[in-house]
Image (cartoon, rainbow, N blue to C red):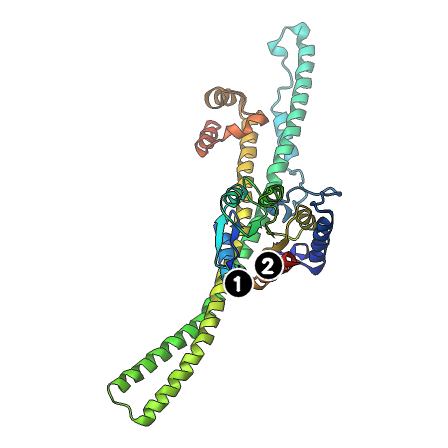
C-alpha cells in the first residue's frame, strides 16, 4: 500500500496542470469540466481496492439447520378438514420467509466480511508508514548525535585551555596554538550546526505520515462501527421471537431490524452492551 | 515588499501538517505564516485579515480545499490570491479539477522542502509575468 505510480508527481501531470491554467488565463474564467470529473476523491477510499466480496460458504449450512427445525406438520393444531391447506400455507410461508431472510442475511454477511480485509489493508498501510517514519527519525537522530557531541567535546576542551591561558599557565607558543585551534573550531561550528539543522528538518518531515495515517484510521473507525452494526442486525434478526419482542419494546421502541433505524440501534457503546446482553451474549 | 514578507495562510485539518508547512516555509525564508483548520475558518481569516498566499490541503471536513478555492475565486476581494493546493495523491482528475477551478499550483504529499520551494517559486514567477 505504498505510493504507486498513480500517486506520484510527474512532469506530464505538471504540464497538464499548466496547460489548463494557461487556457483559463486565455479565457479569463476558470474552465468548467467538459469531461465528467469526480468532485471529491476520498484519499482513504481511493487508495485501496476493495476486494471482491464472496458469499460465505457456511451460509447454506446455516439455512439448512434452520429448515430442520421447521415442524413438518401443523395438523394437530388445526381442524382436520383444513389441516392440509394450513400445512401447505405454513410451508410456503416458511420458504418465503427463509428466502427473504437469506437475501437480507447474505447481503449483511457479505458486507461485514468484505470490510475485514479492507480494514486489514488499511492497517497494514498505517503500520508501514509509521515504521518508515520511526526509522527516518532514528536514522536522523543517530546521524546528528556525533555532530553535536563533537562540538560539545571540542568546546569543553578549548574552554579548558582558555581557562589555563587566563591563569597565565600557557607560554606564547601554546597560546598561538590555542588561538589557531579555536579559530578552526569556530570555522567548523557553522558547518556542523547546518548539518544538525538538516537532520532536525528530516525529523520534522518524517512526521508527515500523521496526516495520511490519520485519515486512514478515521476510515477504519467507520468500518469497525459499520461492522458492529451489521453483526448486531444479524443477531437481532435471528434472535428468538420473545427476546426480539422484549428488545423491540424495551430497548428500541420500534423494530430493531429496520435498516433505516440501524444508526439508532447502537448509538452508544452501552446500548450495544444492552443489546448483546438481551440477546444472551 | 520583498518575497520574504509574503503573508501565508496554511489550511489543513491536521495540526501536524500545519506545523510541518509552517516550519518548511520558515526554512524557505517565509516567517509570516498563519494557520486555519478548514475552509470555513480560512475564509473567515482571509476576509478579516490581509494575506498574500494560500496553501491549502484538499481533504478537510466542513469545507474542503476545492470548495475553499471556489469561494476564493468567486470573491472579488480575494480572487487575485495565489492558491497552492496540497493533495495526498496525484490523481489526474484531481489535478485537472484543481487547475480548472483556478488553483495556482499543486503539490503532492509527502513532499520535500525543495519540492515546496520549486512550486512556490514557479507561482511567484507566474505572478510576475
User: Relative to B127, does residue A151 appear above or below in the rendering?
Assistant: below
Within 10 Å of the Cα at label 2, are there few (<14), some (14-19), or many (20+) other Cα atoms? many
Q: How many marks?
A: 2
Q: Nearer the viewer, residue A84 or A133?
A: A133
Question: Which residue is under mark 1?
Answer: B28
Chain for numbered disc 1: B
Q: Nearer the viewer, residue A261 or B62?
A: B62
- Farthest front residue in view: B1
Chain for numbered disc 2: B
User: Relative to A273, does residue A213 appear above or below in the rendering?
Assistant: below
What SS does tag 2 mark?
A: helix
**Horizontal placement of A277 versus A51: left or right?**
left
What SS does tag 1 mark?
A: loop
**Horizontal placement of A48 versus A208: left or right?**
right
Q: Nearer the viewer, residue A164 or A44?
A: A164
Disc on the earlier residue, 1 or 2: 1
- Residue name at image x 64 percent, y 34 percent: A59
Quarter of the picture containing the N terminus of chain A is bottom right
Task: Kindly indicate whether the residue at mark 2 contacts the one at mark 1 (C-beta within 8 angstroms).
Answer: yes
Question: Which residue is under mark 2?
Answer: B120
Give percent across and percent down for residue A83: 66, 10
Q: Tell me if I can see residue B59 in this picture.
A: yes
Amino acid at each position: 500500500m505504498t505510493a504507486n505510480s498513480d500517486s506520484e508527481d510527474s512532469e506530464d501531470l505538471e504540464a497538464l496542470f499548466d496547460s489548463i491554467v494557461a487556457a483559463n488565463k486565455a479565457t479569463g474564467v476558470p474552465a468548467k469540466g467538459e469531461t465528467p470529473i469526480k468532485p471529491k476523491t476520498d484519499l482513504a477510499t481511493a487508495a485501496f481496492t476493495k476486494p471482491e466480496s464472496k458469499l460465505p460458504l457456511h451460509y447454506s449450512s446455516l439455512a439448512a439447520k434452520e429448515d430442520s427445525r421447521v415442524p413438518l406438520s401443523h395438523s394437530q393444531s388445526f381442524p382436520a378438514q383444513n389441516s392440509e391447506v394450513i400445512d401447505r400455507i405454513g410451508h410456503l410461508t416458511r420458504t418465503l420467509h427463509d428466502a427473504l431472510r437469506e437475501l437480507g442475511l447474505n447481503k449483511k454477511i457479505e458486507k461485514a466480511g468484505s470490510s475485514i480485509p479492507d480494514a486489514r489493508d488499511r492497517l497494514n498501510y498505517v503500520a508501514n508508514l509509521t515504521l518508515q517514519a520511526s526509522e527516518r527519525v532514528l536514522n536522523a537522530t543517530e546521524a546528528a548525535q556525533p555532530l553535536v557531541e563533537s562540538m560539545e567535546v571540542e568546546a569543553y576542551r578549548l574552554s579548558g585551555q582558555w581557562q589555563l591561558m587566563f591563569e597565565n599557565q600557557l607560554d606564547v607558543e601554546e597560546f598561538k596554538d590555542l588561538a589557531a585551534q579555536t579559530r578552526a573550531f569556530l570555522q567548523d561550528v557553522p558547518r556542523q550546526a547546518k548539518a544538525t539543522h538538516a537532520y532536525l528538518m528530516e525529523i520534522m518531515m518524517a512526521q508527515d505520515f500523521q496526516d495520511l495515517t490519520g485519515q486512514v484510521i478515521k476510515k477504519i473507525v467507520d468500518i469497525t462501527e459499520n461492522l458492529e452494526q451489521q453483526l448486531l442486525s444479524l443477531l437481532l434478526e435471528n434472535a428468538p421471537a420473545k427476546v426480539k419482542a422484549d428488545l423491540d419494546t424495551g430497548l428500541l421502541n420500534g423494530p430493531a431490524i429496520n435498516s433505516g433505524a440501524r444508526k439508532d440501534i447502537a448509538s452508544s457503546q452501552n446500548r450495544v452492551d444492552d443489546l448483546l446482553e438481551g440477546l444472551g451474549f | 515588499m520583498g518575497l520574504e514578507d509574503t503573508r501565508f495562510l496554511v489550511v489543513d485539518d491536521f495540526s501536524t501538517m500545519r506545523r510541518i508547512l509552517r516550519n518548511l516555509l520558515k526554512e524557505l525564508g517565509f516567517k509570516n505564516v498563519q494557520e486555519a483548520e478548514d475552509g470555513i475558518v480560512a475564509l473567515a481569516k482571509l476576509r478579516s485579515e490581509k494575506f498574500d498566499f494560500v496553501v491549502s490541503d484538499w481533504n478537510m471536513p466542513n469545507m474542503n480545499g476545492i470548495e475553499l478555492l471556489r469561494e476564493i475565486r468567486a470573491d472579488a476581494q480575494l480572487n487575485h490570491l495565489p492558491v497552492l493546493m496540497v493533495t495526498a495523491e496525484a490523481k489526474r482528475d484531481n489535478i485537472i479539477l484543481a487547475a480548472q477551478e483556478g488553483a495556482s499550483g499543486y503539490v503532492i504529499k509527502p513532499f520535500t522542502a525543495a519540492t515546496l520551494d520549486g512550486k512556490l517559486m514557479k507561482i511567484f514567477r507566474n505572478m510576475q509575468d
